Image (cartoon, grey):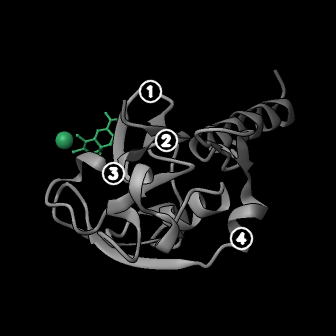
Amino acid sequence: MNAKWTASLILALEVTAISQQAPVQEATLVVKPISGPALTLRARDFARLPQVKVSAKDHEGKSHEYAGVNLHDVLTQAGVPTGHDLRGKEMADFAVVEASDGYRVVFSLAELDPDVGNTQVIVAQSVDGQPLGAKEGPLRLVVPGDKRPARWVRMVTTISVMRAP
Ligand SMILES: Nc1nc2c(c(=O)[nH]1)N[C@H]1C(S)=C(S)[C@@H](COP(=O)(O)O)O[C@H]1N2
Ligand SMILES: [Mo]
């Protein structure tokens, strides 16, 4: 094997290693309302929503700046009732946030509503200015007010809105 060929082989291997480190995966989120068609949100849809930044402590107590959009704004895009429309039967509605590993977490619409529980939940796309890595991204929930980050769902894929039976 000549030196030139070896050099290009090493370069090819390095390029492969780099692309495995930082997979370019577009952030896609499917939101399924109680009735009606599912909504698929992609990067350009997230870009149109109000952008939020929060500082929150991770599992190890280290502070990070997460950037993304409010979960409530995502749900409003999908037509869930909010404000004065969130009353009566809708008070039993909840959102199931599901990840690619099957992990699921529930939030009631009332706890997320700015006029009711006003719990801040962010659908984050980046941490400390960097896109989220494969183990937590491309989308992750951040719930700064929670004592334990058990609802900080990593690798979020789908949100299904349902009504308690
Ligand atoms: N997809 C997914 N998200 C998840 C979990 C999980 O098992 N799968 N575990 C949760 C729990 S119990 C905790 S404490 C935090 C841990 O976050 P970390 O792995 O970034 O430290 O992630 C939460 N998000
Ligand atoms: Mo946990």
Considering depth in this image, is 113 or 25 the residue closer to the camera?
113
Q: Is residue 13 above or below residue 126?
A: above
How far apart are the alpha carbons under marks 1 and 4?
A: 26 Å
Crowding at mark 1 (Cα within 10 Å: few <14, some 14-19, many 20+): few
Crowding at mark 4 (Cα within 10 Å: few <14, some 14-19, many 20+): few
Q: Is residue 36 left or right of residue 133?
A: right
Under circle 1, the secondary element is: loop
Residue drawn 37% across the image and 34% down it: 104
**Residue 163 in the image: x percent, y percent?**
44, 38
Q: Ligand 2 lies in which image quarter?
A: top left
Residue matched to label 3: 152
- State whether label 3 is within 8 Å of ligand 1: yes
How far apart are the alpha carbons under marks 4 and 3?
A: 21 Å
**Residue 24 in the image: x percent, y percent?**
70, 47
Q: Are marks 1 and 2 in contact (CB under 8 Å)?
A: yes
- State whether label 1 is within 8 Å of ligand 1: yes
Residue matched to label 1: 101
Residue matched to label 4: 47
The disc at residue 147 is: none
How far apart are the alpha carbons under marks 2 and 4?
A: 19 Å
Which comes sooner in the sequence, label 3 or label 1? 1
Mark 4 residue type: Ala
